[in-house]
Image (tube, rainbow, N blue to C red):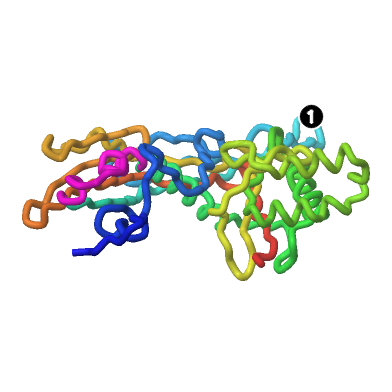
Amino acid sequence: MTTISSPVTQAQTVGDWGYSAAFLQPILLQELAERTNVLDAGLIVTLDGVSGSGSNTVRRRQVGGLGYATRMDSMATETSPGTASGFTSTYSDVTIGRYHLAYEESAQRAIVAADPVTLDFIAGQMVNSWVATLRYLMCTSATGISTAKGTSGQALDTDDWFGLIAAFNETAGFEGQAIAMLHPEQVTDLQTSLRSYTGFQFPEQVQAQQAWGSALGMGMGGQLLGINVYKSVDVQASGGNHVGFAFAPGAFGWAPGDTARVNVPLGADPVAIGQYGLLLTKSFNGSTSVNRVDGNAFLGVGRVNAAVLPQFRVLSVND
């Protein structure tokens, strides 16, 4: 029992009758998280899945040395015999893997909770977790690109950017829009370098080139000297460097496993999003009175050979 003295104050009564905080209902603020969606942005193409194929790998066949790639020979005379030519073949694979995410909630928590973060609310967020997984897998795949631009151990600068442009321009047969995915720090370093670049020594140009690094939605930072720039914190790091990358549209592809083919008992309340390779299920453990939601995704990400579409790692210091 607490003795309350006059005058009665909030400090005396809060312990027995009050609350340490009053919540604004139904407001729930969600912390910042990157929302770059590489699928909606068109940075990765959807391939046919493995469903019913008998394999967990899809393969794209590649041919070279035909058509535009091979010139006709000049013959010594009008009756000289010609020599038959050959061609080259190779392939690129995308292998499906399983990715999982689960959350649990006790029955007592569900009974007394005064906030909107129910297990159903959490389950509804799993599609966004799938988006984050696809983006991460794309950035991870990019570390395997063989040709690098930029300078290891140094900040990304204007000279590196012109070198990247030259690499696209000097790729025989490349026509189209180049795309770059950079770590935000790489974008900052490039902006810093652009401030001293003599081609931008006028107020209008300076304002324009600094604006392109701002978030414009889906992680897009704008266009710089003909290259569409996106940014992501999922860009990988290796050897003290950020490993950004630049590529032609279509270089990256992903393939799903159609989860609509999975026979799940109705009691699990399954939700199959087959085109994403995503399957959500629920379960209840009576011995612990815990509800659980599981998300399983079956997908893979891969790249075509650089001989088909140009692709470059973009290296700069991670400091």
At 26% from the left and 44% from the top, the residue drawn is 119
Which quarter of the rendered picture does the C terminus lie within? bottom right
Residue to which mark 1 is pinned = 78
Of the pair 39 and 319, the residue shown nearer to us: 319
Q: Position of residue 36 (x, y in %)?
A: 53, 42
Answer with the quarter of the image where residue 89 lies.
top right
Q: Look at the image and say whether residue 23 sits in the magenta stretch.
A: no
Q: Position of residue 301 (x, y in %)?
A: 45, 46
Residue furthest to the left in view is: 287
At 72% from the left and 56% from the top, the residue drawn is 149
At 17% from the left and 36% from the top, the residue drawn is 269
At 33% from the left and 58% from the top, the residue drawn is 6
Query: Where are the magenta residues, as a range?
Result: 107-125
What type is the residue that disc 1 sits on? Glu
Q: Position of residue 230 (x, y in %)?
A: 63, 43
Of the pair 304 and 90, the residue shown nearer to us: 304
Q: Look at the image and say whether residue 123 sits in the magenta stretch.
A: yes
